[in-house]
Amino acid sequence: MSLLTITKLTASVGAEVTGLDPAALGADDALGAAVLEALEDNGVLVFPALNLDPQAQVAFCRRLGEIDHSSDGHHPVPGIYPVTLDTSKNSSAAYLRATFDWHIDGCTPTGDEYPQKATVLSAKQVAERGGQTEFASTYGAYDALNDAEKERLASLRVVHSLEASQRRVTPDPTPEELARWRARPTHEHPLVWTHRSGRKSLVLGASADYVVGMDLEEGRALLADLLNRATEADRVYSHDWSVGDTVIWDNRGVLHRATPYDANSPREMLRTTILGDEPIQ
Ligand code: OGA
Ligand code: MN
């Protein structure tokens, strides 16, 4: 008998996992392996009404890999970071408006860390309007290219920066904001990521600033076209949250974004991030 009951949500991305005992999540090694396998296959796993408390979420995530503690301090439980626009709940909330654009977590780390393997969100409070989280497969985006495009894109490299992703939502930064963004190093990544598994994916999203060695506007138009095609409506799974849902996504294989919600919304997601062990190469 399979450990998990998995139902695909769209043809290309996302699956719902049901019949899971939250109490077993933190204690069962085989369950962790089964979740990771299902995650690699589906890009996104939705656990409806799991109602994990923060400690149980961190214990579950430990089964999936090493937990990222670099954003600790915004929530009493180590390993939990509150995703909310409410600055009274999260002093770094201002950066989170950039989640409204398609992106891959971990393309612009502070050092040379690999992109996070997986990100986990649980809904503590949901938005009255908007605030869905949307996902699109970056493996699917590569697979949909024609042969000539695959060949043309194979050697391209792209510079990613925090400034690029922040400018999209804050086009007129103050000098202080700009200086803070620029304090984060830029990172050059291949456009096509060849994974250890042999699968290939496109590395796109808000942090992608320009294509190395290509005319600036031409390169940006190429990136925008690839992103548009990767995220066409029929390639997207949109998760409409209920309080208590948990969703996990694989940053190696999906782009994601939040649909806009009000700055005064009580929406609050509790996030845990699992460190990556695979460079973009
Ligand atoms: C994130 C993120 C999207 C959302 O936490 O990395 O992009 O819907 N969140 O809150
Ligand atoms: Mn994100």
Image (tube, helix red, strand yellow):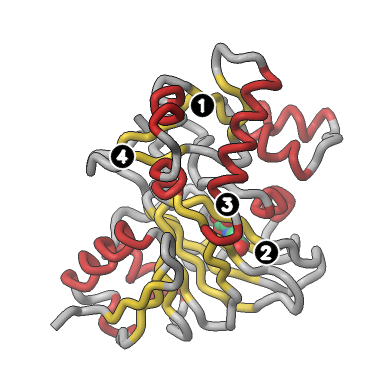
Quick one: quadrant of the N terminus?
bottom left
* Ligand 2 within 8 Å of the CB at mark 1: no
- Mark 3 or mark 4, whichever is nearer to me: 3
User: Badge 1 is on which residue?
Assistant: 187
Amino acid on which the number 4 mark rests in the picture: Glu
Q: Quadrant of residue 258?
A: bottom right
Q: CA separation, marks 3 and 4? A: 24 Å
Mark before the other along the chain sequence, 3 or 4: 3
Q: CA separation, marks 4 and 2? A: 29 Å
Mark before the other along the chain sequence, 1 or 4: 1
Amino acid on which the number 1 mark rests in the picture: His
Q: CA separation, marks 3 and 1? A: 23 Å
Q: Residue at x 24, y 39 (%)?
A: 198
Q: CA separation, marks 1 and 4? A: 15 Å
- Mark 2 or mark 1, whichever is nearer to me: 1
- Name the foreground residue: 180 vs 72: 180
The image position of residue 231, as x and y in percent, is: 57, 52
- Mark 3 or mark 2, whichever is nearer to me: 3
Q: Residue at x 29, y 77 (%)?
A: 25
Q: Are marks 2 and 1 in contact (CB under 8 Å)?
A: no
User: Badge 2 is on which residue?
Assistant: 84
Q: How many marks?
A: 4
Does 23 sit above or below residue 42?
below
- Mark 4 or mark 2, whichever is nearer to me: 4
The image position of residue 86, as x and y in percent, is: 74, 64
Q: Residue at x 58, y 82 (%)?
A: 242
User: Badge 4 is on which residue?
Assistant: 278
Mark before the other along the chain sequence, 2 or 1: 2
* Ligand 1 within 8 Å of the CB at mark 2: no
- Mark 3 or mark 1, whichever is nearer to me: 3
User: Badge 3 is on which residue?
Assistant: 231
Amino acid on which the number 2 mark rests in the picture: Thr
